[in-house]
Amino acid sequence: MPSETFVVDWLLASDPAIRWQVLRDLLDAPEPVWSAERQKVEREGWGAKLLSFQDPDGQWAGGSFLPSDFTREEWQATGQPWTATNFSLTQLREFGLDPRSESARRTVALIGANCRWDEGGQPFWEGEVEECINGRTVGDGAYFGVDVSPIVERLLGERQSDGGWNCERANGSMRSSFHTTINVLEGLLEYERATGGTEQSREARRSGEDYLLARHLMRRLSTGEPVDEKFMQFLHPNRWRFDVLRALDYFRASSLLTGAAPDMRLKEAIGYLRSRRLEDGRWPLDWRVSGRAWFVMDDGEGEPSRWVTLRALRVLKWWDGRQAEHAFA
């Protein structure tokens, strides 16, 4: 297998959205170094490109969840669209657009003034009705400095008895969903990072984590059988979809925030992640969701992916590092 230097150099020969995270998460560069690279997200590459598609009123594609000109017929023909405000904001958060930047502050204010949910017409920062959507809205709002505590309170009251969440709850579902739960967990983690959270939000996050951990991120609790083959296939952007790597990256972030040791119930998923590494040290993009998107950021399905590789390497760096710490403790 080629040296780690080859893979890191390949990652660095990319977009600022990738480079600053490589500097911080893989190379342990000092904050002034990675922060300077992060500032480029607003002005260069994917971040600047996505910002260039923003409407004058602060929205993207004229809508909150759906583009203003989108039809159900197009959804059936080509798939769910990803160009409206909700998914664009989440993408900017993943890129690492600095919340203190002029573009971020302007966007937050304009969306608050002009964006309304397709579902009920309520202001964007008040949240929607589906837990998946509200999980992302909490994550985006907390990251960009919005008070999203009312949405958090709503999510806390919508938890299922098994500890997680399901956006089909309103339609009678009594069991949690991997997809919904990871969206809510990421939102609650961002809220906790921004505010410290509340006793209730921290407890809810722990119960959601336990829902996934009890199932080893991939197995049915009742039979131990795999839940869904798609969970084992890595994609980017994930949008609302769960996969094992997304969950591992969440647990890494949770551990780094709280100082908790890695949970041994992640061991099977870590082993699977290692097994998917290509001979050249990178990881492939297994698939990409269909539907409208502003642009693509990978070379195609089956090809090495910088986003997947970045996430995989920082998960393994965290896992191996924490295991070593505890071995010598």
Image: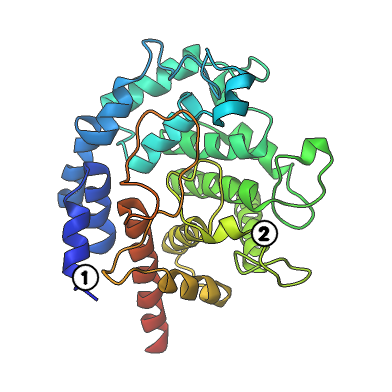
Q: Is residue 319 above or below residue 54?
A: below
Closer to the camera in the image, 143 or 264: 264
Q: Is residue 305 above or below residue 94?
A: below
| Residue 229 visible (yes or no) | yes
Residue that badge 2 annotates: 207
Q: Is residue 62 left or right of residue 12?
A: right
> In the displayed image of the protein, which residue is found farthest to the bottom?
328
Secondary element under disc 1, as helix, strand or loop, is helix
Residue found 34% across the figure and 20% down from its top: 53
Residue that badge 1 annotates: 4
Closer to the camera in the image, 8 or 113: 8
Q: Is residue 283 left or right of residue 291?
A: left
CA–CA distance in space, label 1 to label 2: 36 Å
Instruction: Tell me the mark number nearer the camera, choosing from 1 and 2.
Output: 1
Residue found 57% across the figure and 16% down from its top: 116
Q: Quadrant of residue 229?
A: bottom right
Q: Is residue 107 above or below residue 33?
A: above
Closer to the camera in the image, 9 or 205: 9
- What amino acid is at disc 2? Ser
> In the displayed image of the protein, which residue is found farthest to the front?
77
User: What x and y, as percent, mark residue 189?
Assistant: 51, 50
Secondary element under disc 2, as helix, strand or loop, is helix
User: What x and y, as percent, mark residue 115?
Assistant: 51, 16
| Residue 261 visible (yes or no) | no
User: What x and y, as percent, mark residue 228?
Assistant: 64, 58
Residue found 30% across the figure and 64% down from its top: 282
